[in-house]
Amino acid sequence: MPPSRILPVVLTALCAGAACAQNYPSKPVRIVTSVTGGSLDLTARLIAPKLAERLGQQVIVDNRGGVLSMEMVAKAPADGYTLLLASGSLWISQFLRDNVAWDAMRDYAPIALLATSPNIIVVHPSLPARSIRELIALAKARPSELNYSSGQAGASAHLAGELFKAMAGVNIQRIAYKGQGPAMLALITGEAQLSFPNAASATPFIKAGRIIGLAVTTLQPSALAPGLPTAAASGLPGYESRAMLGMFAPARTSSAVVDQLHQEIASVLKSADVKQRLFDSGSEAIAGSPAEMTAAMKSEMATTGKLIKDAGIRAE
């Protein structure tokens, strides 16, 4: 091919490979996420208007439900106009269900680790344990007698409870409820003796004295659970459980578009009002890089995948 024709071909290939990032975005961007009303929907609606201002294009929140949203974005064009806001279900479902239609590491390009939320290990006031060490000692002294409440199988509260059992070497019985609300009500009324809810669910009842908070499940103390030690530092070394929210594009989206989106989303998450509203809802804004999101996913898949297999957990 003559040199005069090679240059246009090369430039065309470069533009296609980078999704012509210098012109991105030229039309509205869609954030696909789960049904309305949950933490995913709230986070999407906090981010969308400020991201729209920064991109100069409309950003639409499209509520499709968990499984449908993940399948939809995995099959979407890799052009940066269809994004996914998802939690751990994206990378944990393959361990809980057969024939999952997506692969978290193959089908998506991480853009940002948006926010994290710890669980809190809580007990009913009637249970004679006021620390993690006392709780473990009590559970070992009364094998199979203690119970904990949780909602959906495979959700963070359930997995935090099963991880506690495995790492502490205790046998406590799970009582399953249809959601986190009924699981908390069971604890408050004394039908259940302990639980592992997220901070947003637990904190109001801890403040009211209805339940007792023993520890937070992150490796570092959390401002969402002021005054509580970590479980890792108070009797269960290495114990960690947290919910994570991330933003993703379809795989093969150009690195230029991913980087641009990450920079703009990080700026949104660092704004004082967004940080505060996320905090009030029980999450801490992180604005982690694509590499940090990928590393967090891989780490959780390794540890939680083994836990799910060893405990025989299946989605209900």
Image (cartoon, helix red, strand yellow):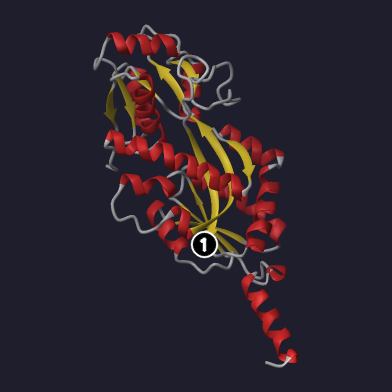
Residue sitting at the far top: 128
Q: How many marks?
A: 1
102 to 79, vertically: above or below: above
For the C terminus, which image quadrant?
A: top left
Judge by depth and name the residue closer to the eye, 196 or 276: 196
User: What residue is pinned by disc 1?
Assistant: 251
Judge by depth and name the residue closer to the eye, 106 or 273: 106
Q: Position of residue 129 (x, y in %)?
A: 40, 8
Residue at image point 50% right, 47% down: 41
Q: Is residue 281 visible?
A: yes
Q: Position of residue 70 (x, y in %)?
A: 43, 56
209 to 89, vertically: above or below: above
Q: In this image, 292 relative to 11: left or right?
A: left
SS assignment at label 1: loop
Residue at image point 25% right, 14% down: 143
Residue sitting at the far left: 144
Amino acid residing under circle 1: Ala
For the N terminus, which image quadrant?
A: bottom right
Residue at image point 71% right, 71% down: 23
Q: Position of residue 147 (x, y in %)?
A: 29, 20
Q: In this image, 270 relative to 101: left or right?
A: right
Residue at image point 66% right, 54% down: 51
Judge by depth and name the residue closer to the eye, 226 or 243: 243
Q: Residues within 10 Å of mark 1 (few under 14, many from 20)?
A: many
Q: Position of residue 278 (x, y in %)?
A: 59, 37
Q: Is residue 153 visible?
A: no
250 to 153, vertically: above or below: below
